[in-house]
Structure formats: C-alpha cells, structure tokens
C-alpha cells in the first residue's frame, strides 16, 4: 500500500463518536457560517420514513439546530411516503416538479441531482430512507468533518451491514456489490480509491461547490461515478469517511444486485472512456439477461438498463439564475 494512501486512511477516516458533543459541533458550524440541508431520496418508503424524520428533526433541528432544513425528494411513490414525511415536519417534493424545464427521469440519481437546485444548504447530506436503526449520527457523523476540515469536500459513511430478514437479523453481510465488483475494479484501475471502505454507501455529505460541478447518472452508477469524478478533479485528499458502526437495512435479492452491477459497470466504463482510459473496448450493450427457476424450467428475463446522465447542475441556466452566477 502506498505511503500516500496509508496517510490518507489515518488522517481522513473518522468515527462518529469523535463528534458526539453536538454543542461543540454547533459552535463550529456557527464559526464557519455554513448552512446544512439534509436530503432523503425516496420511492415507496412509508414504513421507515416517519421514524427517520422524527429522529432527525427532534435531535438535529430542535434540540441541536445543526441542520437548517430536512427535505424528502420523491421519485413518484404510490404509497403514503410523502404524506407520512410531511406529517412529521419534512419539506416534501416530487422530483418531477423541480426544474420542470429539464423533464423528469425515474431514478435515485435524479432525486439527488434535483436536490442541489431545490435545497439551500452550503452542505447537502444525503441519507437513504430504508435504515431500520436510524440515529442522528447518520447525519452529524458525516457533516462534522466538513465543518472542521476545509480541505475535505466529500465524506462517505461506512459501517457493519447486518441484513434484516423476516426471521430476524443476520449478523454480517451486505456490501456484496462493493466487494465483488467495485472494489476489484478500483483495485485494477484506481488503487488509491480502495481506501474507501464502502464506496457505494447511500449516506454522504458534500459541499455544494463540488455537487454542482459533477454530472449525475440517474441510476445505479451515481455513487461510483461521483467518486471517480471527485477523485479526478479534487484528488484523494478531498475525501473523508466516517465509521457509523452499524446500519440495518432490508435484504436485496441476488437478481436485483445483478441489475445494480450492470448499471454500475456501464457508468464505470463510460467514465473510463471519458477519461481516455478505455483502450479498445467494443460498444457496450444495455440489455441484461437473467434466468430464474420456475417449477421445472428456467424463465428468461430481459432488462434494458440505460445509465442516463444529468449534466453538472452549474451548467443549467435556471440554477445559474437562482444562485446569481
């Protein structure tokens, strides 16, 4: 392991307990003058969204006013996600109503991208909506390094990821796409990025001046692409990562992970092409074929997965006008 990477791991890896004193954190926030937005992207999350809003609002807005706004950006839920979130005090938005001139695309990355335009914070902290053991550390543990370390721009979460099954909790697991796809890819082409424990984690806090300057895939590849783009423009030193101990979430089927991997590979290879690193790769196809046993036969399923991409927000005229650029 390179000395640079060893040094980065030692200096830029944090534990949430370092920031447990939230009064001190609040003083530091006031000293910097920065504002903070918490964004929760959703699609049919009525089972968990209410608890997240209650805990974040009571602890991080009312008890310690670290967060200036809490917003849910939704892809078009058919359950009561938005009603539940609103009833507990979150600002709620349908992604299609934000920047309507740019159209609406379905995908988590679309919600994250449109949040840059809609929310006001100098720092945006993204937290997934399916966390069963939600705690304020999922926000303050990520925001804190940005308040104390001006050279850090992008802070990723990592944790132990036990899986929630109907029978209970399996003590270890999760992060399967990271370990069998993304980590090997980074090891081959971007060895310095292997210092990130969980590059695909859905919780991260980022400075606005970084978010508005990077493109956003709207699908599975958004986290991987972010890391490659931030690394290219700002280098390894821009990253931080915080140990949040444990994150309990629902299990995903292997076939779903296959679709996720297919989308991530599209984004990864697309980025390599953009950076002039693709060599002689042939044209990529966007159809994923999967097989599933049904009775005594195998049933084929074909999925078209296209990793469309939004441009950097700073290139959108409506955003430039809103921000006075």
Image (spheres, rainbow, N blue to C red):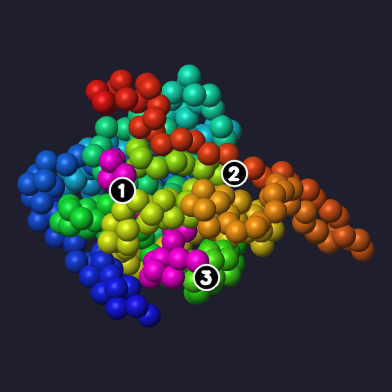
Whole-number angstrom distance, CA of label 1 to CA of label 3: 26 Å
Task: Say which label, 1 or 2, has the lower sequence index.
Answer: 1
Boundaries of the magenta span: 189-210
Task: Say which label, 1 or 3, has the lower sequence index.
Answer: 3
Comparing 193 with 197, the one in front is 193
Q: Tell me residue 146's x, y (percent).
A: 22, 53
Q: Which residue is the site of mark 2?
A: 307
Residue 288 visible in rendering:
yes
**Is disc 3 surrounded by few (<14), some (14 to 19) or many (20+) residues within 10 Å?**
few
The residue shown at (64%, 42%) is 306
**Is disc 1 surrounded by few (<14), some (14 to 19) or many (20+) residues within 10 Å?**
many
Describe residue 321's horizontal placement relative to residue 272 as left or right.
Answer: left
The residue shown at (26%, 26%) is 325
Q: Which residue is the site of mark 1?
A: 206
* Disc on res. 188: 3
Task: Say which label, 3 or 2, has the lower sequence index.
Answer: 3
Asked if residue 266 is positioned above or below residue 98 in the image, the reply reads below
Label 3 element class: helix
Q: Tell me residue 300's x, y (percent).
A: 84, 53
Label 1 element class: strand
Tell me, yes or no, whether the highlighted magenta stretch contains residue 107.
no
């Amino acid at each position: 392991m390179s000395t640079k990477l060893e040094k980065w791991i030692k200096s830029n890896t944090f534990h949430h307990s370092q920031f447990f004193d939230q009064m001190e954190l609040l003083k530091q926030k006031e000293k910097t003058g920065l504002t903070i937005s918490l964004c929760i992207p959703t699609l049919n999350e009525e089972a968990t969204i209410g608890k997240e809003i209650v805990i974040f609002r009571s602890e991080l807005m009312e008890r310690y006013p670290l967060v200036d706004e809490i917003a849910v950006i939704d892809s078009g839920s058919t359950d009561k996600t938005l009603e539940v979130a609103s009833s507990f005090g979150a600002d709620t938005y349908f992604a299609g109503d934000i920047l309507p001139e740019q159209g609406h695309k379905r995908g988590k990355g679309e919600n994250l991208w449109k949040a840059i335009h809609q929310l006001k914070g100098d720092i945006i902290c993204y937290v997934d909506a399916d966390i069963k053991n939600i705690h304020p550390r999922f926000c303050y543990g990520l925001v804190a390094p940005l308040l104390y370390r001006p050279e850090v721009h992008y802070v990723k979460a990592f944790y132990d990821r036990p899986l929630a099954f109907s029978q209970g909790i399996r003590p270890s697991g999760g992060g399967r796409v990271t370990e069998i796809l993304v980590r090997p890819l980074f090891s081959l082409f971007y060895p310095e990025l292997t210092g990130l424990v969980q590059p695909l984690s859905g919780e991260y806090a980022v400075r606005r001046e970084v978010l508005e300057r990077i493109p956003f895939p709207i699908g599975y590849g958004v986290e991987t692409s972010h890391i490659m783009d931030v690394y290219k423009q700002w280098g390894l030193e821009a990253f931080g990562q915080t140990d949040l101990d444990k994150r309990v979430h629902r299990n995903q089927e292997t076939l779903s992970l296959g679709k996720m991997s297919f989308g991530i590979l599209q984004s990864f290879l697309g980025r390599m092409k953009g950076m002039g690193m693709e060599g002689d790769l042939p044209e990529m196809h966007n159809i994923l074929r999967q097989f599933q046993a049904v009775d005594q036969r195998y049933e084929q399923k074909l999925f078209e997965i296209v990793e469309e991409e939004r441009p950097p927000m700073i290139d959108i005229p409506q955003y430039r006008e809103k921000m006075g650029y």
